[in-house]
Image (cartoon, rainbow, N blue to C red):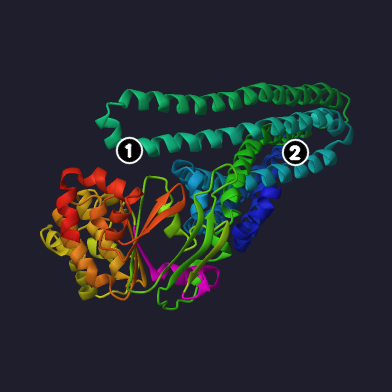
Amino acid sequence: METFKKLKPYYWPYKKYFFYSIAFLLLVTAITVVYPMILQVTIDEVVLKGKYHWIPYLTIGFILVMSVKGVATYINQYSGDLFGINSVYKMRNALYEKLQYLPFKYYDNAKTGDLMSRLTADVEGFRFFLSFGFSELLRFLILIVISVAVMFYYSVPLTVVTLITLPFLALVVYKFDRAVHPAFRGIRESFGKLNTKVQESISGINTVKSLSKESFEISRFNDSNGDYKENYLFTSKIWAKYFPLMELLGNISVILLLAYGGSLVMNGSLKPGELVAFYSLVWYIIWPIVNLGFVINQFSQAKASGERLIEVLEAESDSGENPALNNYERLKGDVEFKNVWLCYDEDSKDALQDISFKAIPGKVIGLIGSTGSGKTSLTQLMTKFYDPSSGEVLIDGKSVTHYSLGTLRKNVGFVLQESFLFSTTIKENISYGRPEATMEQVIDAAKRAQAHEFILELPNGYETILGERGMGLSGGQKQRIAIARAICIDPSILILDDATSAVDMETEVNIQKALKEVMQGRTTFIIAHRISSLKHADEILVLENGRIVERGKHEELIDNNGPYHRIYDIQFKDQKTVLTSNNR
């Protein structure tokens, strides 16, 4: 029950619905046991003794009992649903909130499809047990206890003989639970992997089709689907193995009942009506125990689902902070790195090695180097996406650990290499980081990002609703909206991570002209592969294998004839002489 104890904060606040459900469950169960007793009276008193004048009273009494049971069943089931639905509503919100605040490091290894499976299928599996499975388990236990009590009232010897197989039945049920839980854990995990395959295939459908890899993706899906099927078949084998054995033990109890109970009726120790009632009552015990396998099935699924939910809920958040709850303070943007090293995990090499530099407000720092040289890693330390392994990152003379996450991330504007847009209006995309922004501020940001003109050409202008991930816009248009979004929050530090890689040269020149005004008074970092994007920077840092191997202005680095000059040669070749003379 450790899983349910850990998840108690999510369902216990709604315990009143649970207790309502249990209270009326007791009433429903008690009424259920009354049926055999009415049957016993009908046989022994009405039929055998000829008290036919009792029939109208028994009929009215039966109708009343049925009516009460109907109302009680409705309240029991509705209260149970209220308990389960409200509980998982709170749990699903908590899971989604947790996913928002988990660090970048968590998502380095997480699979989108698996996380979606936890947020949907696993939550629903847990809800089903709260709403239905738990009450069924209690109903079975209560029904067994009351039925045994009535059976002892009718005949102690017959009760003992009839229930002699119950310990064996209980043992089989216990073994079934031990075998089926790991099997359901496997089903949940394989379903998460199946979801991941579907999500990746749909998200990358353009790549799949452009490379004619449909058959390959179908084959990969078949493998994952086959694994899911095998896990289900394994679980079915467990069920097929134990259920007939449980049913056999139940039928042995019935045989003992009929054999011994019949002899008691023959010698007058038991009335015929009591034997008939006894027969009904014994099934009120056997079937709950046999169907306990079904409830255990649901319990095992809920437990497996709960364990996967706990893995997310107990994952360590960003330095234990919730950015939405932090106070905000405006920073100047004075950035300094002091002997910073970064290693993402023990098995990988250092992403950054002994990085030291200083950037003051109003200055532009260019970062260039081959893929994997550490350019993006360097900028991510400013907002504590990752923590340095050693060394210190300072902003305005204080370590970034001094500031709340909210302060850091509202003072740093990111334009990432892959621009992500939400399925909402262009206006809401631009003002996403600053929802209170006026329309004038949104338009101003768009103009600075050279996005205003093409936005006005769209059917509904700024109110145009974009498709998933910005579907309907070109790569350059999406990047310009992303730049406008970063400008809109009015950051102290602006980071352009290959932000103009998807636009043509003419648009890049126009954006750079517009950004010159935006960069005034801010500390700006430009990550680029194209020298044309950062040659105007106040200082350019050339990175190789996580180290700064060269630094200086564009003209100085050209004259050094080092790594930067080699990049320049590759990119400009025949134009090198003309461009160099123009820059000088």
Amino acid type at mark 2:
Glu
Q: Which of marks 2 and 1 is nearer the N terminus?
A: 2
Vertical placement of 204 versus 567: above or below?
A: above
Q: Nearer the viewer, residue 400 or 167?
A: 400
Callout 2: few (<14), some (14-19), or many (20+) C-alpha neighbours within 10 Å?
some
Amino acid type at mark 1:
Gly
Residue 412 inside the magenta-drawn segment: yes
Question: In screen coordinates, is 477 left or right of 152?
Answer: left
Res. 54 image quadrant: top right
Residue at image position (65%, 45%) is 58
The residue identified by callout 1 is 204
Q: Give the range drawn in magenta.
A: 396-415
Residue 577 inside the magenta-drawn segment: no
Res. 143 image quadrant: top right
Vertical placement of 364 versus 196: above or below?
A: below
Residue at image position (22%, 73%) is 439
Question: In screen coordinates, is 426 left or right of 195?
Answer: left
Res 279 visible: no
Q: Nearer the viewer, residue 420 or 280?
A: 420
The residue identified by callout 2 is 45
Depth check, mark 2 against mark 1: the one in front is: 1
